[in-house]
Image (cartoon, grey):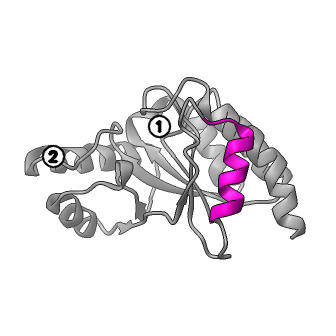
Amino acid sequence: MLTFDDGPDARYTDKLLDVLAANNIKATFFLVANKMPQNLAVIKRMQKEGHTIALHSLNHKSQWLMGYKHTKQNFTESLAILAENGLKVEYYRPCWGLTNLFTVIFARRYGFKLIYWHVMAGDWSKRSNDNSIINKLNRRCKESRTVICLHDSGEGSGGAPGAPLNTICALARLLPVWRRQ
């Protein structure tokens, strides 16, 4: 299963959606809530094309060291943005996979299923390129039910500037091969 974190991003997400559409692939997008209002067109496209929309956080900050008040605020503000934009989601992925006790409590309270990943390809790194992403994915994805975590946004979320373009190029080359296999 392909999943993407850190978007939506007007610079990259539409290009990624083009690659997915060309290969008839559905994915799950873990979105940063405070990026949603300015990217509603791309979110509507995700919905129209049958992708799953999920929550990543309010502002892509690690919750590892957050206390009760900040964690609650993260969830309540995210839920408000989702509601304002008519979005209902059931999945939540914490940033960097880091949680605290309150993250788990609030995720359950609001009915979210926590989703992590099996494989990451370091596609956010400035050292990655489309070849390195392809090689990592081919080496690490052995099971058909593998949850793959990639990224459709870079700078502003801890990724290198332009990094999602490498992911898009890698998937444009790799998805047709995987489909044939």
Q: Residue furthest right?
A: 180
Q: Position of residue 74 (x, y in %)?
A: 24, 45
Residue 33, above or below 121: above
Q: Is residue 133 magenta?
A: yes
Circle 2: residue type: Leu
Quarter of the figure that contains the N terminus: bottom right
Mark 2 vs mark 1: give the one in front: 2
- In what element is the residue under mark 2? loop
Q: Position of residue 80 (x, y in %)?
A: 31, 45
Q: Is residue 149 magenta?
A: no
What is the chief secondary structure element of the magenta stretch? helix
Inter-mark Cα distance, 2 to 1: 25 Å
Residue, disc 1: 36
Q: Earlier in the sequence, mark 2 or mark 1?
A: 1
Q: Residue at x 37, y 49 (%)?
A: 96
Closer to the camera, 28 or 168? 168
**Range of magenta residues:** 128-140
Toward which corner of the image does residue 35 lie, by quadrant?
A: top left
Toward which corner of the image does residue 124 lie, by quadrant?
A: top right
Quarter of the figure that contains the C terminus: bottom right
Counting other residues with Cα less than 10 Å from the Cα at mark 1, is it few (<14), some (14-19), or many (20 or more)? many
Q: Residue furthest top?
A: 161
Q: Residue at x 42, y 32 (%)?
A: 158
- In what element is the residue under mark 1? loop
Q: Is 72 situated left or right of 178 in this image? A: left
On residue 65, the disc is: 2
Residue 108, above or below 167: below
Circle 1: residue type: Met
Counting other residues with Cα less than 10 Å from the Cα at mark 2, is it few (<14), some (14-19), or many (20 or more)? few
Camera sees residue 83: no
